[in-house]
Image (cartoon, rainbow, N blue to C red):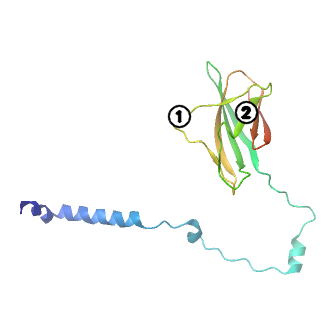
Amino acid sequence: MNTLVIFKRFEIWLLLALVAALAVFALQPEETLEQAVETEPEPAKTLAENDANRTETPEAVEEPGLSVENVSVTGTKQGRIVELTLSGRSSTDEEIAVTESTLLAHTDAGDPVNHFFAPFQEPPVLYPDEDSLVTVRLWLEKPAESIWLDFQGRKVQTELPR
């Protein structure tokens, strides 16, 4: 009977109520963005309005791949760390991790440039349906003026700051 004395304390009942409320909150399903944002459909346009809005120049089609947004170089005693901020999307219907196997880099002289090893960092990912910003760190042993990046068959040249 001495063990049931603990339930006579107000603090214990308050603690049990708080735990029950947190459990109910944690088990609720998340509201997705599509459920949260309600959009009104656009009114239908007639064929004449569509012809009036049409321009003579064809629209530019986005080519999947990478573009370099920012480049920074940090010098060390043994070499240089090149940090690239890249913008782009995957050309396939799947997410692609930007690793040494998917993003090849070499200097303008043809020397390979290795990725900088970060042991507990997950590789950045490019998504197929929207542009993604990723940061890639490369290890450059010798000074160079530019680096060539090869991603999914598309090559991009990056000038390095001095």
Picture quarter with the C terminus: top right
Distance between the alpha carbons at the discs numbered 1 and 2: 20 Å
| Badge 1 vs badge 2, beta-carbon distance below 8 Å | no
Is residue 87 positioned above or below 129 on the image? above
Is residue 150 positioned above or below 30 on the image? above
Check disc 2: other Cα within 10 Å, few if <14, some if 14-19, many if 20+.
Answer: many
- The x, y position of residue 128, in whole percent, is 69, 54
- The x, y position of residue 123, in whole percent, is 59, 42
Q: In the rendered structure, which amino acid carries the disc numbered 1?
A: Pro
From the viewer's perspective, tell me whether residue 91 is left or right of residue 139. right
Question: Could you tell which of marks 1 and 2 lies nearer the N-terminus?
Answer: 2
Picture quarter with the N terminus: bottom left
- Residue 73 is drawn in which quadrant? top right
Q: Residue at x 33, y 66 (%)?
A: 21
From the viewer's perspective, tell me whether residue 128 is left or right of residue 5. right
- Residue 28 is drawn in which quadrant? bottom left
Out of 13 and 94, give the one closest to the viewer: 94
Q: In the rendered structure, which amino acid carries the disc numbered 2?
A: Ala
- The x, y position of residue 89, in whole percent, is 71, 51
Is residue 160 positioned above or below 9 on the image? above
Q: Residue at x 87, y 71 (%)?
A: 53
Residue corresponding to mark 1: 119
Out of 10 and 133, give the one closest to the viewer: 133
From the viewer's perspective, tell me whether residue 40 is left or right of residue 2. right
- The x, y position of residue 65, in whole percent, is 76, 47
Residue corresponding to mark 2: 105
In the picture as drawn, the residue positioned furthest to the right comes out as 56
Q: Give SS at disc 1.
A: loop
Q: Residue at x 70, y 35 (%)?
A: 71
